[in-house]
Image (tube, rainbow, N blue to C red):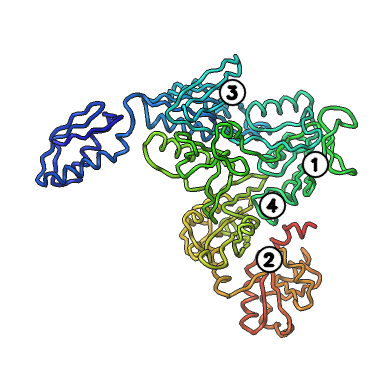
Amino acid sequence: TVSVHVTRCTPFNIPEYVTMMANVLTSTTLSSFSTSASAVVLRLASSSGAPAMAALSRGLSMARTLSTSTAPRKYVVVGAVAGGASCAARLRRLDEKASIVVFEKGPDPSFANCGMPYYLGGEIKDRNALAVQTPASLLARLNLDVRVRTEATSIDTAKKIVKARDLRSGEEYTESYDELLISPGAKPFVPPIPGINRPGNLSLRNLEDMDRIKQWIEDRQCKTAVVAGGGFIGIEMAEQLRHIGMDVTLVEAMPQLMAPFDPEMASMLQAELERHGVKVEVGAPIKGFEAPAAGGPGSDVVLDENRRLTADVVILGLGVRPDTELAKAAGLALNARGGIIVDERMRTSAPHVYAAGDAVEVKNPIVGGEWMVALAGPANRQGRTAADNMAGHSEHTFDGTWGSSAVRVFDLTAAGTGLNERLLDSAGVKFHAVHLHPNQHAGYYPGAQVLSLKILFGAEGKRKGKLLGAQAVGKDGADKAIDALAVALQAGMTVDDLADLELCYAPPVGSAKSPINYAGMIAQDMLEGLVETVQWHEFHDLASDPANLIVDVRTAAEVLNTGPLHPSAVNLPLDDLRARMGELPQDKTLITYCLAGQRGYYAARILAENGFAVKNLDGAYRTLRESPIRRD
């Protein structure tokens, strides 16, 4: 008989584990067992005697399934929505007998905050569709004690107590916990701009904010709007306010919209906004907000002494900051930006305190170090990881955020994963870029649309050829391409792997060589020295250098239709190149380009094989045409 004494034992899950352990030890069979709150008593028949029994004893003592208490555990979750709600739901699935208390400062414990702009624009008709769960539904389905309009005001990590205030009654009380998760999220950034708190300057964080925006627009019959900030919220709000017929101006202080994207990709989104009637001001920091000179609701938005925009409503989408005052007061370790520092199991610096969501700092698995990424998907997974560890179910880890995201802008979708050029530069990583513009499916099948795709990959050392980031913009297929590239990025794939990926193909949905295959093949050619490329932002300086000659290998009809990229370019169509290459100088570096890049590459190979010094414009006419340089 082996008696294994276990503290805080859960009898109901012992038989399966014990049987498994006995079966693993092939010379040992389990004849009977009994359990109590403090011990598991096993009777075994064993030919190997003590060694087998000792192994079984060690296995039982190590089993995390025996490390939960018969006395119900108590979990407290501060902040619901994504990370907190996911954690609480997972805790219930792991521990049916536990007491789980959720504090939520707002009125809605679980709502689709990413859907709020689409309700304001009328695409989502039913407001109730955004309220994913209510306190009553969470109680009925998951037996969660959800307390809305209740603010956690302090945490005593030594005594394991949370102090809370009911915002309706003013009542204050305390709740003890065995394990605590805080998921405070991020709050809108409100910079100290004169007049920024004027009536009608509204932010969008929760359903109450959404209702205030809708009521302000409807009550005042607003016709004009200024959206301050060109990030996700700003672009989505500009699109949706335009959907309901408003005159919209989108103002961004930086030189481009959508900071996660590189300028030449973000420029496509700006063009799409403008095509649909949204006026866009980039490189235009707001100096102040003043009462409208002409009267009426809203503000005059002051850009400089000569430019001001009149708006019946102003949407403030100027970014977010971690909402971590509670964590700071509790003594939790924070980073320089105020984000909560956690380990891979979502544990904070205080014992028995975990954190998840937009307020936490996580690993950057691409180049190392840490970063903060406010995205719904990672927040939900962080909540699950925290729950697994809080309940002692497993030691699952959250190994970082890869930054995969998407946004729709009228008829285009833009998606990205990994790092952009600016972030790679700041990390000191040497990289190459590839731009291409294939169709999203077979060109001969009706409905083919151009997909603009960019990949970034390592140029040297251990990162050489390794995928580091990708971006795509198109009417169809951008999210599909980036989903696949996000998997490739997380799997540590190289451009050789991309070239060899076997992806789904049928003419209505893809091509025999997918855009991802093409991207990998182009990158292979670069690394193998078959082609040297010029980037869009280098083109005009190189074209103005008399040591170079620009060779446009499109057809004469194409050039006539669109014009050349540079006045000095000579037109020598690809199909005539072999017969006419004698017209080209041997003492200059030739820079070839076509419409999308493929013909320019073919021309570069022909010329290189015939002794010319030659480079190809990466991404060709389409990339440069869409870039900020071309726009200027």
In the rendered image, is residue 284 in sight? Answer: yes
If the image is split into quadrants, where does the N terminus sit?
Answer: top left
Q: Secondary structure at mark 4?
A: helix
Return the disc, 1 or 3, that comes first in the chain's sequence: 3
Residue carrying label 1? 286
Circle number at residue 266:
4
**Mark whose residue sits in front, 3 or 4:** 3
If the image is split into quadrants, where does the C terminus sit?
Answer: bottom right
**Mark whose residue sits in front, 1 or 4:** 1
Q: Residues within 10 Å of mark 4 (few under 14, many from 20)?
A: many
- Tell me the distance, in whole angstroms, between the alpha carbons under discs 1 and 4: 21 Å
**Mark whose residue sits in front, 3 or 2:** 3
Amino acid tagged 2: Gln
Return the disc, 3 or 2, that comes first in the chain's sequence: 3
Amino acid tagged 4: Ala
Amino acid tagged 1: Ile
- Residue 453 screen position, x and y as percent: 61, 57
Return the disc, 1 or 2, that comes first in the chain's sequence: 1
- Residue 502 screen position, x and y as percent: 46, 60
- Tell me the distance, in whole angstroms, between the alpha carbons under discs 3 and 4: 36 Å
Circle number at residue 107:
3
Q: Is residue 390 left or right of residue 324?
A: left
